[in-house]
Image: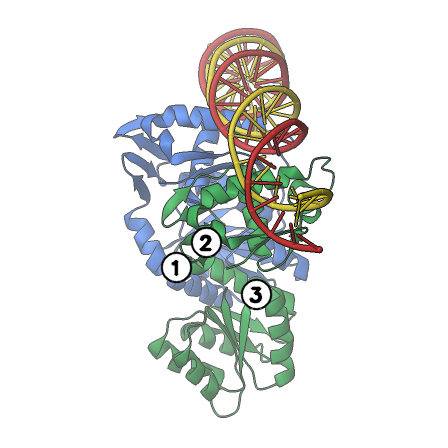
Chain colours: A blue, B green, C red, D yellow
DNA sequence: CACTAATTTTCACAAATTTTTCACTGCCTT
DNA sequence: AAGGCAGTGAAAAATTTGTGAAAATTAGTG
């Protein structure tokens, strides 16, 4: 059964959608703001997230960005604001669809089904191997664990996020700026060498598999097997 | 490069979208009705299809149904009718997205990008893998690798940048000044012979394919196959 | 709320690598 | 044959990365 997380600050809206979702055979869960959504996503594995844009504490866009750091779950953005700017921004940070309020629950359900259907091939593959394995380096996306030759590696959060991002961009050259903006956040004001230090720690934790983290002199780094 | 098929009976609309698509780096093709769209899809491999619903000869829904029998290409439906019924119907027959006219070309492009990004793991990998091949010289732009007869060439950053720039200006005569200002930066204060030295190193690393780097006496260099 | 532990960030320095300079050689062109 | 221009090798200069340690930040706890 597919699990759906519904994020909106209005309880009424959450209820309506949840009811429909349940009727359609989904297992709905709710969050009232971006912070809660991020927390829930880190704990649970949802098959899709419906995310309102305008919310207290943490807005929908920022929440998606935060969630995407650790989970690759499809997201549909809900917004009362139908302006083009928002739409584009939503897609850019990787929303899979965008629905403008007021929407009909039926339409939302149809869009959920469309996305789940589309992702079913890759999703199923991903579900069966939610963990990636490169030689003796295993990354368990679900449990957020990394194993080096079967032994659990104790990575700090940043180290894990960095590895996760690099693995998801396997074979692609990543500049320090790109890494800082995607892993640390677009609003990070800091030293380039910060990346180096984390790469150092990551390498040291990956033991022999440090070999997968390639230095591209004058450029940045990349993960390559 | 991604190939997009634009299906609409109004030439004007096709033109506008095609223009935008080209600007965005897609390779647009057009069809004026459902029949033509089906025929073209059977012949060619498109990465995505934009399909109008209301068309003479064969309507959009039927066309998609027909296309899906032979090809599993993503489809975005375009429709002047924004009624919910159509939307649901569109998703049911497997449309990947649904845009209601009048739409802004920008929004359509954003949706195309969203879908292509999502599907990139399947067949389009070679498309995303921006790699150029000239004889036995292969340049993998994404991974920043250069292969000479399948063997990885260890280029220094400047060597890579120089090669990258020259390849992107294939067949064009490049003066030392132009190279210095474009590859090194407009603020570079230095000797002209610097270019020569890097060309030397690059040639030596490209082995037999040094032949692509042509000296233009009294002028500069160019890359030509 | 202060204290502790863990994590993240900054930073300076050494080591490694790359870039630049430059003198010299030799080839092309007129 | 001479003058100009490109090719080359090697040394010097500059840049970049790896790393350790200290400082700053964050989270957890009594």
A104 in relation to A198, above or below: below
Question: Cα distance, mark 1 to mark 3?
Answer: 23 Å
Q: Please give left or right for residue A209 compared with residue A188 in the image.
A: left
Question: Cα distance, mark 2 to mark 3?
Answer: 19 Å
Residue visible at 46% across and 35% down in the picture? A161
Q: Can residue A88 be spotted in the picture?
A: yes
Mark 2 near mark 3, Cβ–Cβ under 8 Å?
A: no
Question: Cα distance, mark 2 to mark 1?
Answer: 9 Å
Q: Quadrant of residue C25?
A: top right
Q: Chain of mark 3?
A: A
- For marks 2 and 3, the one nearer the N-term is 2
Circle 1 is placed at which residue position? Answer: A119
Label 1 or label 3, whichever lies nearer to me, is: 1
- For marks 2 and 1, the one nearer the N-term is 2
Q: Quadrant of residue A90?
A: bottom right
Is disc 1 surrounded by few (<14), some (14 to 19) or many (20+) residues within 10 Å? some
The dot on residue A74 is 2
Is disc 3 surrounded by few (<14), some (14 to 19) or many (20+) residues within 10 Å? few
Circle 3 is placed at which residue position? Answer: A103
Residue at disc 1, secondary structure = loop
Residue visible at 31% across and 50% down in the picture? A127
Mark 2 near mark 1, Cβ–Cβ under 8 Å?
A: yes
- For marks 1 and 3, the one nearer the N-term is 3
């Amino acid at each position: 059964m597919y699990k759906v997380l519904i994020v909106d600050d209005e309880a009424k809206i959450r209820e309506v959608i949840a009811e429909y979702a349940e009727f359609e055979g989904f297992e709905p869960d709710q969050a009232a703001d971006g912070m809660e959504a991020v927390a829930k996503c880190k704990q649970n594995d949802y098959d899709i997230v419906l995310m309102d844009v305008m919310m207290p504490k943490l807005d929908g866009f920022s929440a998606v960005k935060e969630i995407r750091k650790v989970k690759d779950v499809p997201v549909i953005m809900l917004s009362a604001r139908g302006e083009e700017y928002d739409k584009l921004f939503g897609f850019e940070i990787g929303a899979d669809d965008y629905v403008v309020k007021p929407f009909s629950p039926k339409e939302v359900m149809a869009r959920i089904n469309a996305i789940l259907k589309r992702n079913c091939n890759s999703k199923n593959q991903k579900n069966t191997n939610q963990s990636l394995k490169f030689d003796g380096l295993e990354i368990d996306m679900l449990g957020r664990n990394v194993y080096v030759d079967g032994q659990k590696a104790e990575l700090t959060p940043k180290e894990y996020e960095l590895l996760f991002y690099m693995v998801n961009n396997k074979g692609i050259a990543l500049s320090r700026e790109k890494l800082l903006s995607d892993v640390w956040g677009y609003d990070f004001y800091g030293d380039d060498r910060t990346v180096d230090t984390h790469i150092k720690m990551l390498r040291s934790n990956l033991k022999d598999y440090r070999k997968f983290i390639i230095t591209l002199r004058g450029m940045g780094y990349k993960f390559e097997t």
